[in-house]
Image (cartoon, rainbow, N blue to C red):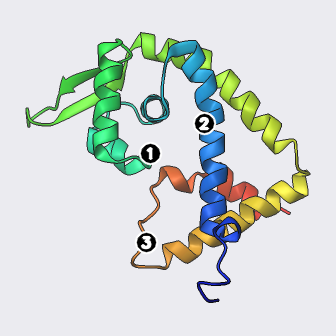
Amino acid sequence: MTPDTFHLSSFLPYRLAVLSERVSRRLSVEYGRTHGLVVAEWRVLVHLLRCGAVSVRDIHNCVNLEKPRVSRAVSRLEAEGLVQKTQGEGDGRLVAISLTEAGRDVLTDIIPAATRIERSMMEAVSPDDLATFFRVMERMHAVLDDDPEAKPRTEMDRRPGITALAQQG
């Protein structure tokens, strides 16, 4: 392929990025409207729900956001009373971030709407096509897993539910 024949709109990485961004923006309409959250704040809250008290570095490594965005999100969530910071045991320089009850309540409100959006997208394709889609995603991840220049997947990105579904069919 030459620069003259290259079309961004058919370039797989671009198409994946566009779809991902559209889904994120659609979800952000829900949690933005109901709780004034942005994408980074939603990702931080959901990560804390799954992992408990963790550092900003742990969040940064797991939610696919740059460290400054995670730090700003944590600061805003703390100001809103949705997360709390505690000094790490043994090393006072380390700070652990965790959900507050108010943060859990916000997620209790948001997660049903988010899962409805996910379900509507998943119901748009057949179960066989969805299983094929997950298998294809896993194969693409495997290519990147074998590439020493690619950022490694986190354990969260290797969720057994997705892997198991990808292996079905």
Q: Which mark is residue 25?
A: 2
Q: Quadrant of the N terminus?
A: bottom right
Mark 2 vs 1, N-terminal side: 2
Image: 9 above or below 90: below
Which residue is located at x 58 percent, y 73 percent? 142
Inspect the image, locate mark 1, and give the three-letter code of the amino acid beneath it: Val
Q: Is residue 88 left or right of residue 155?
A: left
The label nearer to you, 2 versus 1, is 2
Q: How much space separates mark 3 and mark 2, taking CA atoms? A: 26 Å
Q: How much space separates mark 3 and mark 1, taking CA atoms? A: 16 Å
Q: Which residue is mark 3?
A: 150
CB under 8 Å between callouts 3 and 2? no
Q: Which residue is mark 1?
A: 63
The quadrant holding residue 95 is top left
Image: 39 above or below 153: above
Which residue is located at x 44 percent, y 45 percent? 63
Inspect the image, locate mark 2, and give the three-letter code of the amino acid beneath it: Arg
Circle 2 crowding by C-alpha within 10 Å: few under 14, some 14–19, many from 20:
some
Inspect the image, locate mark 3, and give the three-letter code of the amino acid beneath it: Ala
The quadrant holding residue 8 is bottom right
Furthest residue in direction front, as rendered: 4
Q: Position of residue 153 (x, y in %)?
A: 47, 61
Total marks shown come to: 3
Dot 2 falls on a residue whose secondary structure is helix
Dot 1 falls on a residue whose secondary structure is loop
The label nearer to you, 3 versus 2, is 2
Image: 129 above or below 78: below
Mark 3 vs 2, N-terminal side: 2
